[in-house]
Amino acid sequence: MALKLHPYLDNLLSKDGGQEMKLKCILCPVDFSKSSKAALDYAAALARESEARLVLLHVVENPLAYDTTFSGPAPTEKEMQEAEHEFADMLEGLGDIATEHRTVLGDPAACVVQAAEEDSADLVVVGTHGRTGLSRLLMGSVAEEVVRKAPCPVIAVKQPPDDA
């Protein structure tokens, strides 16, 4: 009896009877934290192995997206440029992987889901900060929302221990 897979996974598997994944596009959102760098390591390894295009997305959070009464300024062009500079440092270590990178302004989870749809991502690899309790309740979980709303499978990579 043949193993019945989810139709999405069935389309990604090679048709020659093997179980090799045919990933074409992997999306990896980054916020330059330890957890997003760990996710980038996973995403880069998968992209290298499958010869997939790796799309890196940095979202500059817009406080106005959450609170319409907030009167503070939106992120400046300088903040966007600083993000691009840090992004460039991250890209140096990726070697010969086909990459794209973007910095956008908005709600992180919504922007990741939108990018996954627009780029026809086969997989999203996202880092988790591992917040619990009140911190998670107040801050929410971008990774959790991406898992629930993304149009493709999502791998959530735990934040490495502080001594790692």
Image (cartoon, rainbow, N blue to C red):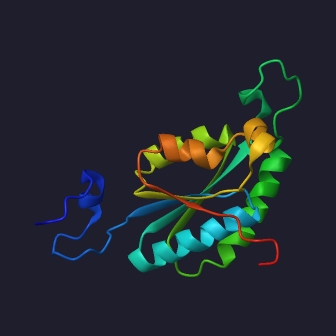
**The N terminus: image quadrant:** bottom left
Q: Tell me if residue 92 comes above or below residue 99 in the rendering.
A: below
* Camera-nearest residue between 82 and 114: 114
**The C terminus: image quadrant:** bottom right
Q: How many marks?
A: 0
Please name the residue shown 47% across and 62% down the image. 26
Q: Is residue 121 left or right of residue 2?
A: right
| Image location of residue 31, percent across then percent down | 72, 56
| Image location of residue 110, percent across then percent down | 58, 38
Please name the residue shown 88% across and 23% down the image. 71
* Camera-nearest residue between 96 and 161: 161
| Image location of residue 17, percent across then percent down | 16, 75
Q: Is residue 113 left or right of residue 22?
A: right
Please name the residue shown 60% across and 77% down the image. 94
Please name the residue shown 23% across and 71% down the image. 14
Q: Is residue 110 left or right of residue 138?
A: left
* Camera-nearest residue between 1 and 20: 1
* Camera-nearest residue between 55 and 41: 41
Q: Residue at the top extreme?
A: 69
Residue 145 position by quadrant: top right
Q: Is residue 8 left or right of residue 105?
A: left
Q: Residue at the left extreme?
A: 1
| Image location of residue 96, percent across then percent down | 53, 81
Q: Tell me if residue 145 comes above or below residue 1 in the rendering.
A: above
